[in-house]
Image (cartoon, helix red, strand yellow):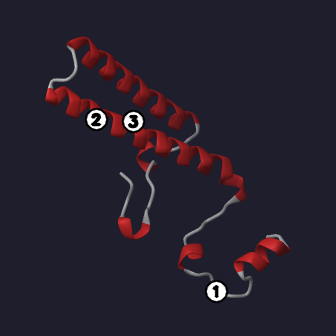
């Protein structure tokens, strides 16, 4: 840890609740960043899926639009799973702990 970072974080003082949850492993930074990005992509995919279902149930989509949305969302899910496999990330680990608000998904 650099001296500037140590000063900013209050080196010597016990970590506060927010800092106690931060686990920084320099060897895993790229994988952790990939997990965060994939989590956000999966969150957006689920939001789009929920919106598509609402529109479908409301009857505001044609049959062709429904089919296209289904194909697109299925391909997006396949891409996320494929990237997880390549990066050795468990798809079920794609989530964020939002503290008192609970889990993102």
Q: Which residue is mark 2?
A: 51
Question: What's the mark number on residue 14?
Answer: 1
Q: Which quarter of the picture shows residue 34? A: top right
Q: How busy is the neighbourhood of tag 2: few (under 14 within 10 Å), some, or many (20 plus)?
A: few
Question: What's the mark number on residue 45?
Answer: 3
The CA distance from mark 3 to mark 1 is 39 Å
**Which residue is rendered at x = 47% and y = 28% of the image?**
79
- Pick the front one: 66 or 6: 66
Mark 3 and mark 1 lie on one chain; the one further toward the N terminus is: 1
Mark 2 and mark 3 lie on one chain; the one further toward the N terminus is: 3
Residue 46 % position (x, y): 35, 39
Q: Nearer the viewer, mark 2 or mark 3?
A: 2
Q: Which quarter of the picture shows residue 6? A: bottom right
Q: Nearer the viewer, mark 3 or mark 1?
A: 3
Q: How busy is the neighbourhood of tag 1: few (under 14 within 10 Å), some, or many (20 plus)?
A: few
Question: What's the mark number on residue 6?
Answer: none
Q: Which quarter of the picture shows residue 58? A: top left
> Is 70 on the left-hand or right-hand side of 15?
left
The CA distance from mark 2 to mark 3 is 10 Å
């Amino acid at each position: 840890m650099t001296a500037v970072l140590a000063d900013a974080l209050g080196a010597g003082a016990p970590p506060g609740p927010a800092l106690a949850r931060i686990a920084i492993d320099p060897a895993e930074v790229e994988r952790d960043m990939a997990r965060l990005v994939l989590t956000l992509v999966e969150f957006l995919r689920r939001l789009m899926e929920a919106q598509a279902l609402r529109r479908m149930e409301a009857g505001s989509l044609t049959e062709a639009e429904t089919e296209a949305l289904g194909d697109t969302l299925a391909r997006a899910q396949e891409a996320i799973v494929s990237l997880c496999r390549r990066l050795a990330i468990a798809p079920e680990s794609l989530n964020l702990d939002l503290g008192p608000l609970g889990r993102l998904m």
